Image (cartoon, rainbow, N blue to C red):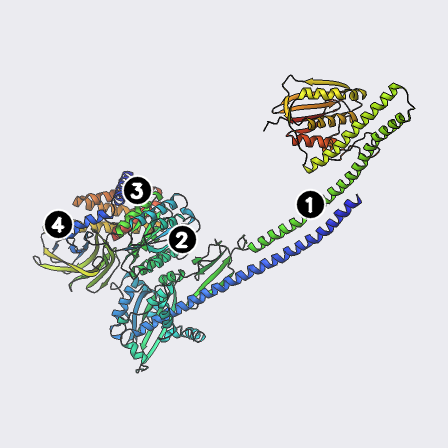
């Protein structure tokens, strides 16, 4: 018992640090998961910034190209080229030519009234403040200048032969055509509309009065953003320009958004009213959900922002690392705990085995010694010739023979147990009549049974009991059961042999009206070395192997052995015996 | 009565769709053989509502500029088509609708030839290209890609059309008939969603020769948005109540696309110096002094498209005859790939004989004028109903119905009378139950088809 406690104690000593380590590992893994999630979020935000920068550069380049193209227009055929441009270029929504005539603002194109389409009339109404001279075209110059200074290097496209053109040319060489490239090509004027102004400009000559002012005006009207670009080539010349087709710009920009975002994240382009203008990423965004980050898209699109959203109820997708790690940790702990349990169980079983073996050796020694003592005592008596009475001599010799048989059965059991344990027992099948076979054994042992004070009853159903089985093995089973009954049910009054047939099995029952077997021992009596009373001073001799051997033999022969209580007192051992067909 | 009319309409539509489905392109080509005999040029006609006008007073005259498209020539290979299907796969499309949309996509694919380009874009909250633009060669492979489409998510309609346009642009430089067919059953809830915004997108796409035809399924989509997008990009617009009609609609639409006989149609109407343009009825156009400019993207084989313009003419003496207008049409012939032109002139004589004037009425012009006014009245009724002015909307429809009835009776025209009856029933229904989603969609689609004659002639 002390040993058992020690083992459990040591196992617990081993288990506790394991669990502590597991807890520590779980905490570390959680932190690691948080770190991974945080770095994924940071990467997503950085990616969103890159998208914004790309949008900004694209718009800036497009606007730069457009201004350049406007400046390149032939001043002699300005209206014609502008109209042609508006009719064919998806990026241009409206065009205009405006100038001051005798200090009065005058819109040369589009003309007010029926000469304009409905769209042009809306256009005129939209920019009424500019076209009526209430607001100068360069009212946001300061803002633009600040931006220009901040982004000086990036604004080179405005200079005509800058990086936008270089970028455009580079893009042309690339296979396929991105939306950005399409936009760049749309924003450039076809060569036939340009005059020799380009060559003239490149020559560096600057005629008097030439100012080349330009600007872009983000204009809010009817809850929408409009963008107007204008140029003025000469101080006294007209101001002319284009209104960007914002939907074309947006339509082209959104097709270049990243498409391979994770399922639990999204980038959402939002206008100044937080309307979702485009979404990239599969995440279903709750209207109340706050974005992880809101990044201004471009100074050219005031109030437009790119929102970065991630799933706040982190699903399996972004906690994969934690879940896999926890799974591994769980497997590791389970392996340790189950290994510990198995080792403890094996140790305890080994301890029990060792104890049972010690008890077995003592019992067998005792069992061997008892008949040997009788044999030796009666043999010595006969040898001394002090006993002359023939009857007594016969009795003594009979005891010697009985005890020898008992010794033989004991030794046979021990030998058979060894063979059965190693699976080396071989069976010899022959055809027998089970009823005759049982009668013969009962007859042979009737003296022993009667001398135990028990009566013999038989109850055979009238059936054909011819069976092919191992006769000797079956005899050993019956003898073990008979011995068991004689040992433990000797205080009973009868022993009953029943033969019957159930399905494919012949059933042999050996029942007695002895004290019976308690419920807790009913299965254990078939375990090896088990004895209900295993002390040396037990009332009944025995090795604790008889029933184990009997069940094992029957199972090897395809049957089984069980015990049931008899109604009232006693036990009934039921052997199911299977018929073996000849090979 | 109304139900009977609707049933008749349905039977006609089914019959037409059946014809389109059963008779493949070869039948279109056979038609073209007759075309080759009858000549290939687009005919431009300019007519006034009366050939004889009252003398001695200034008056408004309605001009009808009709373009009669020739049939598809049979001996010439038809121009290749660059078709992008943009399909709604939002959650509401689940079940029959998405399955029928897929079947419709396959139907469209099967009607294309190897020289054509085909792409499929799907959209829910996101946009994805299921079939990138490619020649319609590997049909089985493309069908397998289409089979992967599953419904779920929101409706990013703008993104879908943008992506569809992006697929079209891959072959924009080549000589294709470019067409996007957009299908939706719900309200756009991601991206620009106002009809004006989508209209602007359509207006920009038409500059790249890309037309968008829109197909609304069920009663929950935004018909204003779909009609506007189609109108601005010179596409067709359809309303189907159930997904089962989709394959037929796609086949009919593709029939139109494969039938294009004139692209980039520009009409310039020149008026004499003393004739003034008052207004262009229904269509968008530009009045620059004596010149009126109109633009139509494309005409289908055997189609008649027209524009109505109201002009004011000065008083003229009885017995005189004068030129009222001249129309010049320039268009690109997709078969010869050349710019061709056609023109028509209208003359009117003046008289004081009112009988002569009445007898000279051009019923066709008057009828189309009335039907266009009716379409505008329908648009106005929708706007009034949207403002909650049901009574005024009903009045508007009834007034238009009465006008149609009176004209129908005067000129004994069945079409006008039928239209008047249908409108009266509809007005009655709206008066009793209010304007249902379905009523609104029918009115919007009908008025669109009347004003722009976009539906192919059946």
Separation of disc 3 and disc 2 at Cα?
A: 39 Å
Q: Are marks 3 and 4 on the same chain?
A: yes
Could you say which is closer to the camera, residue A178 or residue A345?
A345
Q: Nearer the viewer, mark 1 or mark 4?
A: 1
Q: Secondary structure at mark 1?
A: helix
User: Would you say the residues marked 3 and 2 are in contact, meaning their CB atoms lie under 8 Å apart?
Assistant: no
Whichever of callouts 4 and 2 sits on the residue coming sooner in the sequence is 2
Image coordinates for residue B36, horizontal then vertical, percent: 16, 52
Question: Which residue is the site of mark 2?
Answer: B123
The chain carrying label 4 is B
Q: In the rendered view of the protein, which quadrant contains the N terminus of chain B?
A: top left
Could you say which is closer to the camera, residue B401 or residue A461?
A461
Question: Which residue is the site of mark 3?
Answer: B428
Image coordinates for residue A494, horizontal then vertical, percent: 76, 20
Q: Nearer the viewer, mark 1 or mark 3?
A: 1
Which numbered marker is on residue A342?
1
Residue, x 46% and y 56% (percent of image)? A281
Q: Residues within 10 Å of mark 3 (few under 14, many from 20)?
A: some
Q: Residues within 10 Å of mark 1 (few under 14, many from 20)?
A: few
User: Would you say the residues marked 1 and 4 are in contact, meaning their CB atoms lie under 8 Å apart?
Assistant: no
Q: Secondary structure at mark 4?
A: helix
Could you say which is closer to the camera, residue A345 or residue B179?
A345
Residue furthest top in the image: A462
Question: Which residue is the site of mark 4?
Answer: B358
The chain carrying label 2 is B
Q: Is residue B343 left or right of residue A562?
A: left
């Amino acid at each position: 018992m002390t040993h058992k406690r020690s083992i459990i104690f040591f196992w617990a000593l081993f288990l506790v640090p394991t669990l502590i380590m597991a807890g520590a590992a779980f905490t570390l893994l959680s932190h690691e998961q948080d770190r991974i999630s945080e770095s994924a979020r940071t990467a997503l935000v950085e990616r969103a910034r890159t998208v914004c920068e790309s949008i900004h550069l694209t718009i800036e380049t497009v606007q730069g190209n457009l201004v350049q193209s406007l400046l390149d227009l032939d001043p002699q055929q300005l209206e014609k080229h502008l109209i042609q441009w508006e009719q064919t270029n998806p990026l241009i929504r409206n065009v205009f030519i405006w100038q001051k005539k005798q200090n009065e603002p005058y819109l040369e194109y589009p003309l007010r009234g029926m000469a304009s389409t409905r769209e042009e009339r809306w256009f005129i109404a939209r920019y009424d403040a500019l076209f009526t001279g209430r607001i100068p075209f360069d009212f946001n110059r300061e803002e633009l200048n600040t931006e220009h200074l901040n982004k000086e290097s990036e604004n080179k496209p405005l200079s005509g032969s800058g990086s936008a053109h270089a970028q455009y040319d580079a893009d042309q060489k690339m296979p396929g055509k991105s939306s950005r490239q399409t936009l760049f090509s749309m924003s450039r004027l076809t060569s036939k509309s340009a005059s020799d102004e380009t060559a003239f400009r490149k020559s560096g000559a600057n005629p008097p009065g030439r100012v080349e002012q330009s600007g872009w005006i983000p204009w809010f009207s009817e809850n929408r953003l409009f963008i107007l670009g204008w140029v003025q080539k000469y101080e006294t010349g007209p101001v002319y320009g284009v209104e960007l087709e914002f939907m074309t710009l947006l339509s082209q920009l959104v097709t270049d958004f990243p498409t391979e975002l994770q399922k639990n994240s999204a980038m959402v382009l939002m206008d100044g009213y937080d309307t979702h203008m485009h979404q990239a990423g599969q995440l279903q965004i709750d209207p109340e959900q706050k974005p992880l980050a809101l990044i201004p898209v471009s100074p050219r699109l005031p109030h437009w922002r790119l929102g970065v959203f991630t799933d706040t109820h982190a699903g399996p997708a972004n906690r994969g690392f934690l879940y896999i790690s926890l799974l591994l940790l769980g497997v590791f702990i389970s392996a340790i705990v189950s290994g510990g349990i198995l080792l403890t169980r094996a140790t305890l079983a080994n301890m029990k085995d060792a104890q049972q073996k010690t008890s077995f050796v003592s019992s067998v020694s005792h069992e061997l010694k008892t008949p040997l003592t009788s044999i030796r005592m009666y043999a010595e008596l006969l040898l001394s010739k002090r006993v002359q009475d023939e009857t007594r001599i016969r009795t003594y010799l009979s005891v010697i023979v009985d005890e020898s048989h008992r010794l033989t059965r004991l030794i046979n059991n021990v030998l058979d147990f060894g063979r059965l344990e190693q699976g080396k027992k071989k069976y010899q099948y022959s055809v027998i009549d089970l009823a005759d076979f049982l009668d013969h054994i009962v007859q042979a042992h009737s003296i022993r049974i009667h001398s135990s004070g028990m009566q013999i009853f038989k109850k055979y159903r009238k059936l054909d009991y011819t069976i092919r089985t191992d006769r000797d093995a079956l005899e050993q089973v019956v003898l073990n059961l008979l011995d068991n009954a004689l040992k433990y049910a000797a205080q009973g009054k009868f022993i009953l042999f029943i033969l019957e047939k159930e399905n494919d099995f012949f059933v042999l029952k050996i029942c007695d009206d002895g004290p019976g077997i308690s419920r807790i021992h009913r299965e254990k009596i078939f375990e090896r070395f088990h004895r209900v009373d295993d002390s040396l001073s037990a009332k009944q001799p025995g090795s604790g192997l008889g029933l184990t051997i009997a069940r094992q033999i029957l199972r090897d022969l395809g049957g089984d052995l069980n015990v049931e209580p008899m109604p009232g007192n006693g036990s009934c051992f039921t052997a199911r015996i299977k018929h073996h067909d000849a090979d | 009565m109304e139900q009977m009319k609707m049933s008749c309409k349905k039977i006609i539509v089914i019959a037409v769709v059946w014809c389109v489905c059963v008779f493949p392109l070869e039948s279109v080509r056979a038609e073209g053989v007759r075309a080759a005999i009858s000549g290939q040029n687009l005919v431009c006609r300019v007519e006034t509502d009366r050939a004889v006008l009252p003398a001695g007073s200034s008056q408004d005259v309605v001009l009808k500029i009709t373009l009669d498209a020739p049939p598809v020539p049979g001996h010439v290979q038809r121009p290749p088509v660059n078709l992008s299907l943009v399909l709604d796969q939002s959650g509401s499309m689940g079940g029959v609708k998405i399955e029928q949309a897929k079947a419709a996509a396959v139907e469209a694919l099967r009607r294309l030839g190897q020289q054509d380009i085909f792409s499929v874009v799907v959209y829910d909250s996101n946009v994805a290209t299921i079939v990138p633009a490619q020649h319609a060669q590997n049909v089985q492979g493309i069908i397998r890609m289409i089979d992967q489409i599953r419904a779920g998510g929101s409706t990013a309609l703008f993104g879908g059309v943008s992506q569809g346009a992006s697929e079209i642009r891959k072959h924009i430089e080549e000589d294709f008939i470019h067409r996007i067919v957009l299908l939706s059953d719900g309200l756009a809830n991601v991206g620009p969603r106002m009809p004006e915004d989508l209209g602007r997108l359509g207006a920009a796409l038409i500059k790249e020769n890309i037309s968008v035809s829109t197909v609304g399924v069920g009663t929950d989509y935004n018909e204003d948005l779909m009609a506007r997008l189609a109108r601005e990009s010179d596409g067709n617009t359809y309303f189907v109540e159930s997904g089962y009609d989709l394959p037929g609609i796609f086949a009919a639409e593709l029939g139109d696309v494969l039938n294009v006989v004139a692209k980039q149609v520009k009409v310039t109407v020149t008026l004499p110096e003393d004739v003034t343009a008052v207004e262009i009825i229904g269509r968008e156009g530009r009045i620059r002094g004596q010149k009126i400019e109109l633009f139509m993207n494309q005409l289908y084989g055997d189609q008649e498209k027209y524009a109505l313009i109201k002009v004011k003419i000065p008083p003229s003496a009885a017995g005189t005859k004068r030129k009222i207008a001249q129309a010049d049409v320039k268009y690109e012939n997709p078969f010869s790939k050349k710019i061709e032109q056609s023109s028509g002139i209208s003359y009117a004589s003046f008289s004081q004989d009112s009988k002569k004037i009445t007898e000279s009425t051009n019923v066709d012009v008057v009828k189309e004028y009335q039907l266009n006014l009716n379409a505008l009245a329908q648009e106005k009724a929708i706007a009034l109903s949207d403002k909650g002015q049901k009574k005024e909307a009903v009045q508007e429809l009834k007034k238009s119905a009465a006008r149609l009835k009176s004209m129908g009776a005067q000129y004994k025209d069945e079409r006008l009378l039928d239209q008047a009856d249908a409108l009266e029933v509809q007005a009655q229904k709206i008066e009793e139950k209010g304007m249902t989603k379905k009523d609104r969609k029918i009115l919007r689609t009908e008025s669109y088809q009347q004003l722009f004659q976009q539906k192919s002639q059946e």
